[in-house]
Image (cartoon, grey):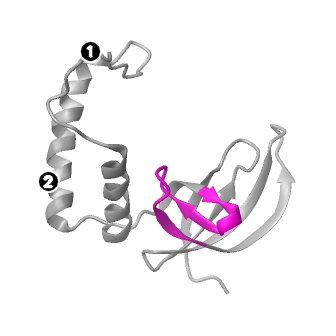
Amino acid sequence: MFTAQQYNGFKRRNARYLEWAKQFVKPNGWTVIPKTAKPPVKVTNHERSACEVYEWHHNPPKEYFCYVELDKRQVTTWMSDSLGRIIDHGHEWQSNFGDTRQSITIKATNGLYYQGVYYKSAGQYARIRRIARPS
């Protein structure tokens, strides 16, 4: 996890990178950066993940999008940095869209509890919300 100094340094570099990347935004909203482009600073996905974990601990969100590693009973960032462990999960059900979903309860590494839906057949992701301590 980042220190406060590393976090602030990354946020400044990332702001420079995002400002530079605006020139590559297409009409559909996608940013497509050519292989030949030379960014002004280097920003890695591991740094983005470390930033995500820092914010998870220092400014805990009310709602979040995370990834599920059910075999390890944990939720993570996209780069597999742990955000918490799954302490309970409900029965699977099929939504009106035909996908399989499952409710999960998480004890987060930031000390809080979250509950949400794991979109099991659509991918390894979940949408979660902060809750009071489960009974």
| Quadrant (top left, top right, bottom left, bottom right) of the C terminus | bottom right
The residue lying toward the viewer, choosing from 27 and 88, is 88
Q: CA distance from mark 2 to mark 1?
A: 26 Å
Q: Is residue 28 magenta?
A: no
Q: Amino acid at mark 1?
A: Thr
Classed neighbour count for the residue bearing mark 1: other residues with Cα under 10 Å, few (<14), some (14–19), many (≥20): few
Q: Is residue 67 above or below residue 56?
A: above
Instruction: Find numbered disc 1 in the image and state the secondary structure of the residue it sits on.
Output: loop
Residue 59 locus on image (x, y percent): 33, 66
Assess disc 2: are there few (<14), some (14-19) or many (≥20) residues with their C-alpha within 10 Å of its C-alpha.
few
Which residue is nearer to you in this view: 80 or 125? 80
Quarter occupied by the N terminus: bottom left
* Up-down relation of residue 90 to residue 95 (above or below): below
First-in-chain label (2 vs 1)? 2
In this picture, residue 39 sits left or right of residue 59: left
- Which residue: 79% across, 68% down? 90
Per the rendering, the mark at residue 36 is: 1
Q: Residue at x 68, y 57 (%)?
A: 117
Picture coordinates of residue 112, whole percent (x, y): 48, 77
User: Does residue 105 appear to the left or right of 64 in the view shown?
Assistant: right
| Amino acid type, mark 2 | Gly
Residue that badge 2 annotates:
9
The part of the chain drawn in magenta is 68-85
Residue 75: quarter of image: bottom right
What element does badge 2 sit on? Answer: helix
